[in-house]
Image (spheres, helix red, strand yellow):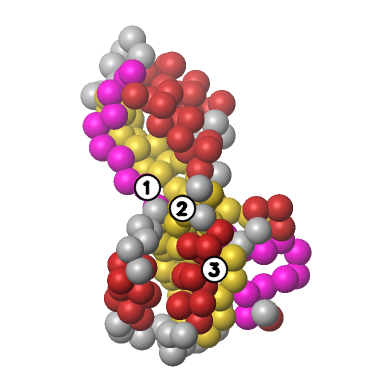
């Protein structure tokens, strides 16, 4: 089983998210992450979906998604020719004994503290999934109070873009 990143240019209108996610559900595939946001083109949103499966699963989903009227462009993102990032907001229990260790970890991972209180530190972490996973593991011993993780976003390197497919 592999992880696939599928990027789509879709119509920016109500119901599109439901139709796309419903396509996965009807075929019995789980969505690992899903992000949607407006693009530089009025009327269009970019949707990035990550899923885990076999090559045949990916092929089936790409074919099914292409049939949806709202999907204008679709592409599997190749890790060697694209950049991908996620974001985590994570709140960790902090006290006078461990606060400096947490701050040092934030600096090593080149992230930033966005809220600071006597009992907790809230941080913003961006990067590849493996970096975020490693940071979460590092913070577990301190006590993760709360965490929110976005889905993956991905763009082609260089001048290639989804709209030019």
Query: Is residue 102 at all visible to an observer of this figure?
Result: yes
How packed mark 2 is, by other alpha carbons closer than 10 Å (few <14, some 14-19, many 20 or more), is some
Q: How far from the left and from the top, in percent, is residue 105?
A: 49, 24
Q: Quadrant of residue 141?
A: top left
* SS under mark 1: strand
Q: Which residue is mark 3?
A: 59
Query: Along the polypeptide, which appears first: circle 2 or circle 3?
Result: 2
- Of tags 2 and 1, the one toward the viewer is 2
- Of tags 3 and 1, the one toward the viewer is 3
- Residue drawn where x is 26% and y is 37% of the image: 146
The span picked out in magenta is 141-163
Q: Residue furthest top?
A: 97
* SS under mark 3: helix
Q: Which residue is mark 2?
A: 52
Verify whether residue 109 appears in magenta: no
Q: How far from the left and from the top, in percent, is residue 47?
A: 46, 70
């Amino acid at each position: 089983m592999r992880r696939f990143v599928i990027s789509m240019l879709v119509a920016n209108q109500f119901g599109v998210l439901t139709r796309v996610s419903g396509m996965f559900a009807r075929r019995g595939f789980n969505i690992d992450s899903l992000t949607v946001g407006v693009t530089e083109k009025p009327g269009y949103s970019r949707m990035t979906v990550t899923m885990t499966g076999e090559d045949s699963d990916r092929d089936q989903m790409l074919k099914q998604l292409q049939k949806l009227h709202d999907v204008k462009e679709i592409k599997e993102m190749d890790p060697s020719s694209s950049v991908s990032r996620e974001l985590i907001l994570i709140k960790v229990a902090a006290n006078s004994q461990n606060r400096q260790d947490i701050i040092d970890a934030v600096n090593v991972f080149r992230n930033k503290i966005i809220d600071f209180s006597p009992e907790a530190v809230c941080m913003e972490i961006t990067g590849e999934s493996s970096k975020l996973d490693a940071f979460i593991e590092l913070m577990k011993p301190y006590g993760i109070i709360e965490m929110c993780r976005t889905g993956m976003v991905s763009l082609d390197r260089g001048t290639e873009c989804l709209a030019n497919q």
